[in-house]
Amino acid sequence: MIDASTFLRRALLADAVFSGVAALGFTFGAGAFATLFNLPEALLRETGLFLIAYTALVGWLASRTAVPRPLVLLVVVGNAAWTVGSIALLFSGAVSPNLAGELMVVAQAIATGVFAELQYVGLRKSGSVVAA
């Protein structure tokens, strides 16, 4: 466990809020977003369902003054992987989004990459190991 810096906790909280909004939108509005973005409805709904669990984890981490360093590193690496995977999805040919869909995927990839960077910086600013 490490003593979480205020910067880290705020970065995690911002990620939880952003992910929570996306989770609700994609889970309950998958049909509308599928039409708007020309992306598969199942992809959006399943992404939303995953984000519900992710939001709970990141929100929990944000609420703690002491956090498990490996778990925060997992969030950072996961966000970085999400960024790369989102861009790879666009180039893969597996989906054919319209311009709005491409912009949405790129925008959330950028946001997720920013969260990864902010969380990494916050992790480096965090205090030493504390007793569990």
Image: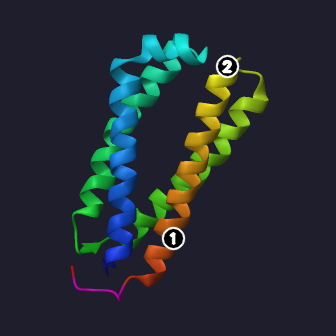
Question: Does 13 appear above or below 2?
Answer: above
Q: Element under label 2?
A: loop
Contact? badges 1 and 2 (CB < 8 Å): no
User: Residue 102, image x and y in percent?
Assistant: 67, 28
| Image position, residue 113 (x, y; %) | 58, 54
- The residue at 26%/86% (across/down) is 130
Question: Which residue occupies 28% across, 62% down?
Answer: 62
Horizontal side, residue 121 vs residue 29: left or right: right
Above or below for 124 versus 115 = below
Q: Quadrant for residue 22, please give it.
A: top left
Q: Which residues are magenta?
A: 127-131
Q: How are the residues colored? A: rainbow
Disc 1 packing (10 Å; few <14; some 14–19; many ≥20)? some
Would you call the spot at circle 2 few (<14 residues within 10 Å), some (14-19), or many (20 or more)?
A: many
Identified by mark 1, the residue type is: Tyr
**On residue 3, which mark appears?**
none
Name the image quarter holding residue 29: top left
Q: Residue furthest bottom?
A: 128
> Which residue is at 34% across, 66% downward?
10
Q: Is residue 23 left or right of residue 65?
A: right
- Identify the image quadrant of the C terminus: bottom left
Asked whether 19 or 73 is in front, the reply is: 19
Q: Position of residue 63 (x, y in %)?
A: 22, 63
Mark in the foreground, 1 or 2: 2
Residue 28 placement, left or right of 95: left
Characterize the magenta stretch by its predominant secondary structure.
loop
Give the labeled residue for mark 2.
Answer: 97
Mark toward the start of the polypeptide (1 vs 2) = 2
For label 1, the residue is: 120
Quarter of the image for residue 31 reads top left
